[in-house]
Amino acid sequence: MSETTAKPIPVVPGHPVFGSTIDFQKGQLDWILEGHERFGDVFSARILWRDWHFVRDPGVVHAVSVTEASKFHKSSIAKRMWKQFLGNGLVMNDGDSWKRQHKLIMPGFQKRRLDAYAEDMVAYTKRMLLAWAGRERIDVQEEMTALTLAVACKTLFDAEVDGDSKMIGEAMEDASHAMVEHVNKPIPRSALVAVEHEPQKGSRD
């Protein structure tokens, strides 16, 4: 966006010290949706002593994620909050390290490779449907988690996890619950640690 058409980003009014932190943690999704309804496609709020920007405009999202990605980096607070769950993978990485990781996995997601996965996807789905025959009750979440895990392991790593899919699925669910619980705390401990280790102005993170 050129300087002549740039507009100030609307700011959510909040507490002088905590900003919108408490309101945000009470119900994050509802708070964000209400914010967009009130302020438009882009707005800002003070959360955890920093300014957070919330974006839903596809053009802006594409610019941040693709065309101008080199100018944007994930905050050190977010990295420390999620690192214990996600490590330094693609979700939390950025910069040159992210580019190297992205380049390594891209061959597995090219169209010709995805087309080749179709046969395994259909076979595993048919096998799951046959196993449902005669069952009165089915835990759809558990079954779909097992199917997704089986397909991913077979297509990406040529590995069978039939005997371990339930155990792995339960472990993934436990980790997911722990991650959400951690982030939904009013002030996650790792966020406080991140603030304590924030670099001084002018230094590089």
Image (cartoon, grey):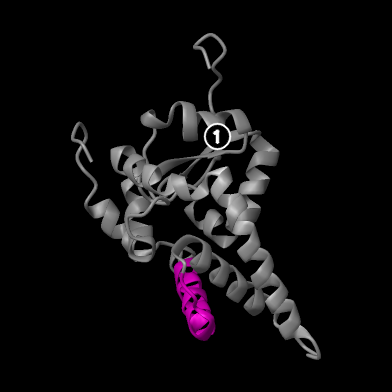
Tell me the quadrant of the picture where the C terminus can be found.
top left
**Span of residues in magenta:** 159-181
Tell me which corner region of the image, top left, top right, bottom left or bottom right, holds residue 166.
bottom right
Q: Which residue is mark 1?
A: 61
Judged from this view, the residue extending furthest toward the top is: 4
Q: Is residue 142 visible?
A: yes
Instruction: Say whether residue 176 is left or right of residue 97.
Output: right
SS at mark 1?
helix
Q: Position of residue 188 (x, y in %)?
A: 39, 63
Is 90 magenta? The answer is: no
- Compared with residue 51, is residue 197 higher up or lower down, i.e. above or below? below
Is 165 magenta? The answer is: yes
Residue located 57% across and 45% down the image: 112
Q: Position of residue 45 (x, y in %)?
A: 50, 41
Name the foreground residue: 20 vs 174. 174
- Compared with residue 1, is residue 124 higher up or lower down, i.e. above or below? below
- Compared with residue 203, is residue 148 higher up or lower down, i.e. above or below? below
Residue located 44% across and 64% down the image: 157
